[in-house]
Amino acid sequence: MARSRVVVAIIGPAVSRLYGRAPTPAGDIEGIGSRRNRAVTKAVVLGGCGGIGRIAAQALASGEWFDEIDIADVRKTDAEALADQIDRSGLRGVAVDATSPDSLAAVLIGADVAVSCIGPFYRFGAPVLEACIRAGVNFVDVCDDLDATQRQLALDGTAREAGVVALIGMGNSPGLANVLVRYAADELLEETTSVDIMHIHGGEPDEGPAVVKHRIHAMVNDVPLFIDGEFLEVRLLDPSGGAFVEETDFRDVGRYPVYPYPHPETITLPQHLPGLRRATNRGVVYPLTYFEHTMETVRRGLEANPGVAVADLPVDDWVARILAERSRLLAEADVSEPGGCLKIVVSGTRGGEEHTYVFSLSSTGGAGAGEGTGIPAALGAILIERGTIDRPGVHPPEAVVDPLTMLALAGDVIGHFGIEHSGGGTLPIHIAHHGPDGTVEELAL
């Protein structure tokens, strides 16, 4: 089979019954035919020098899936340096400005797949997707902003008319969270009634302004939770959100409070899982002193700007104040390397009895939000290029990703990153089954 070319565009309902066939073993991934049967395929990389983008580029370069990988960034010199650092033939760094439609159009010419990791997504999510649709380029991103996701989903008809496959929110949460919920719904339960997604990360060497802006965005906007079959809107910093704050144990990380987050799983999962009555998304960042500093900065900023529209808030000033204290707070908490955990609690019925499955994806020893988000984005691009995901339109992961095929591919990719986790095995996924009789057993994926 001819090797294929990807320019990774890294810029910051019900599932089609792919499950009617046996999942593709890891060793047979290369045997999946190219979607277009072309000798060379191309994707686009925008913002590839960011913490998530550079990981996605490395993941794509870790195998012989693509002939070429272009890393595009507004910082062309940095993009070229990253390409040299990865040191793989066919890899190059190019310049792009995601705020310029002409610049986006130029790098999308002739591309087949774009992976977007540039944030904040409430600014760039829909415009970059629109640019890809106009160019006829398939699309993957890691969008975790609710409002941006809603605008992207509204482009479904336009994408279908253009024949463009758009896989949105293919990161950690959303992303892996959605895929594992789909796995539980299809393989472990007859009816899925409740999903609680919780996430924590911290200790990354750097946090860019876009990451902090996303966090602020989560604190000043409504957070939809799906409770008892109805949507309820709360605010993270208000008493309404405080009612849903709870302590949870994160594998390999520790016990932390989690706060309501406006991640899009709460609006997409109910559309694709008949019978679902509850869907929540809550998260936190460690050390907790850093997250509390962020919350306090935002509280004071809101008090100083009463009645100001969200779009007009002095967010850049808040970001500067938050980041100015980050190094000190991490040092005081003795946090010197990244880590994190995604915890998903899925409940439902099988054989008329209640069952709960707790998935934990944890990592230590240098793997954090970049790895947890960038690797799934790369997997999505590979699956689209191979034709495993080929339905035009705008889709969340639970609608089009075959969990077993994706996880088989993930086993090949993750091994290149040396990610440490407890429990052994190739994938850092731990599953605990809570049975109807109260017993708890460890399951293999």
Image (spheres, rainbow, N blue to C red):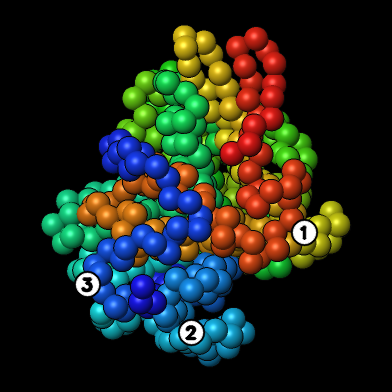
Amino acid marked by disc 1: Gly
User: What is the three-letter code of the residue carrying label 3?
Assistant: Ala
Name the spot of residue 210 as percent of width and height, x first: 52, 64
Q: Which residue is mark 1?
A: 365
Give above or below for 115 relative to 340: below
Q: Quadrant of the N terminus?
A: bottom left
Name the N-terminal-most of marks 1 and 2: 2
Question: Where does the C terminus fall, quadrant-wise?
Answer: top right
Q: Earlier in the sequence, mark 3 or mark 1?
A: 3
* Residue 158 point in image, percent of width and height: 17, 56
Q: Earlier in the sequence, mark 2 or mark 3?
A: 2
Whether tag 3 and tag 1 are in contact, CB under 8 A, the answer is no
Quick one: label 3, few (<14), some, or many (20+) residues within 10 Å?
A: many
**Which of the pair 323/53 is nearer the observer?**
53
Residue 67, image quadrant: bottom left
> Which mark is on residue 135?
3
Q: Are marks 2 and 3 in contact (CB under 8 Å)?
A: no
For marks 3 and 1, give the one nearer the viewer.
1
User: Which circle marks residue 91 in the picture?
Assistant: 2
Q: Is residue 101 left or right of residue 122?
A: left
Q: Amino acid at mark 2?
A: Leu
Q: Of helix, strand and loop, which one carries label 1? A: loop
- Badge 2 local density, few (<14 within 10 Å), some, or many (20+)? many
